[in-house]
Amino acid sequence: MKITSVDIFQVKWNQQYGAWHPIVIRINTDDGISGFGESGIFYGDGEYGALGSLKDLSQIIIGQDPRNTEKIWQQFYQRTFWGKGSGTTFYAAVSAIDTALWDIKGKALGVPVYQLLGGQTRTEIPAYASQLQFGWDPETRYLATPADYATVAKKAVAEGYKTIKIDPFMLDEHGNFGQKLIGLQDYAQLKLPVDRLKAARDAVGPEINLIVECHAGLDVNSAKQFLPLIEPLNVFYLEEPCSPLSPELTKQLKDVTAMPLASGERITTRFGFQPFITNRLLDVIQPDVAICGGISEAKKICDMAAAFDIGVQLHTCGTPIATAMALQLEAAVPNCFIHEQHEISLKPDNEWIGKFAQQPQDGVFTFSSRPGIGQELSDAAIQESHCETIK
């Protein structure tokens, strides 16, 4: 079996999120089997960087046997120069290609990818309702008042979710988007985020897990002020409370709080995760299969974390292809304990991208038995998206 071409799709997106431009690839072979993968750096300001890297790396694999996933990954790492020391743009491209290769391998053997990763360690996995500050509706609406946060928290719990995640910093007191609390803050700057979280906790009661998302919008100084204010809320874990790329800064927060800390969506490869894992600076790691280096690398990262009793919650924020990628790992990896059901997954403009419906029931995902990653672009998505083919 040989790779004949790579199709790079800029997937059509109709509404909301102006900086949301999904990128999915399809690797084609001379046996007629094709595999899909997603490049997870398409949102924010990463679209064209991901496209450029995909064009470069796709040329390397033309003519190769797609089943040699480890060989190809090592070619990217050892022989491209930027494989060593590069970051999210490069490895988001590697991730898409690596995952598509695994998809081909699973389809060729007629089994889900998780069977090739050691088989199932579970038959289902709980999901959590992620990013409730966006409203948890088919139409995005940025929430502002503590009462809004209480209402949306109750809504998610009513749908069966036992865990919710909220970023309380998304809007400031004036309704302006993108609040960043860098440096020491007046108490008034911290009161509104704390009140939002208190309202959500009071609304759902003590038995629902509450994850607090910071999106690295704090630094160590403001985080040291903020953490004691939310400790009484019994936080399940605190996500990205400071720069996600600095083990030293993470250690400073680890030393002053008993709250479990989580991070990893912007960290790539086992080499990037290594200092956080071996020094046990995080209680939960959050690699994104569409960013960290693909299925090959995500499995290695998870296994490394298991040796240090660190849990895994794969960051999942993308199309149904990204969801399927995460579920393959979550079915097989023992220390994956929960799936991130991002609010983007509620959007009709996202659901239509996938060929197969794949949503949790009562807050729980089961695993598809379809071969490969169990998901493809829908025919409509293929027809309506811009495609560039590398041969």
Image (cartoon, rainbow, N blue to C red):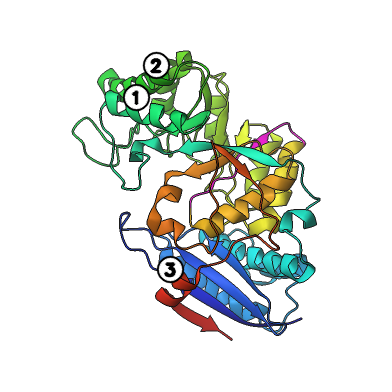
Residue 324 rendering spot, x and y as whole percentages: 60, 55
**Location of residue 220 with respect to 137 vertically, above or below:** above
Q: Which residue is mark 2?
A: 202
Which numbered marker is on residue 11?
Answer: 3
Residue 374 rendering spot, x and y as whole percentages: 64, 60
In the rendered image, residue 184 lying in the magenta stretch gets the answer no
Mark 3 or mark 2: whose residue is earlier in sequence = 3
Which numbered marker is on residue 150?
Answer: 1
Toward which corner of the image does residue 201 lie, by quadrant? top left
Q: Residues within 10 Å of mark 3 (few under 14, many from 20)?
A: many
Q: CA distance from mark 3 to mark 1?
A: 35 Å
Q: Residue at x 54, y 72 (%)?
A: 54
- Report the front residue among 262 and 74: 262
Toward which corner of the image does residue 99 lie, by quadrant? bottom right
Please state the extent of the stretch shown in magenta in the rendering: 307-317
- Give the residue type that dot 3 points to: Val
Q: Is residue 184 visible?
A: no
Mark 2 or mark 1: whose residue is earlier in sequence = 1
Q: CA distance from mark 2 to mark 1?
A: 8 Å
- Report the front residue among 301 and 138: 138
In the rendered image, residue 313 lying in the magenta stretch gets the answer yes
- Give the residue type that dot 2 points to: Asp
Residue 381 rendering spot, x and y as whole percentages: 45, 70
| Quarter the N terminus occupies | bottom right
Mark 3 or mark 1: whose residue is earlier in sequence = 3
Which numbered marker is on residue 110?
Answer: none
In the rendered structure, the answer to whether residue 32 lies left or right of residue 379 reads right
**Location of residue 379 with respect to 364 vertically, above or below:** below
- Give the residue type that dot 1 points to: Ala
Q: Residues within 10 Å of mark 1 (few under 14, many from 20)?
A: some
Q: CA distance from mark 3 to mark 2?
A: 40 Å
Q: Mark 2 touching mark 1, by CB under 8 A?
A: yes
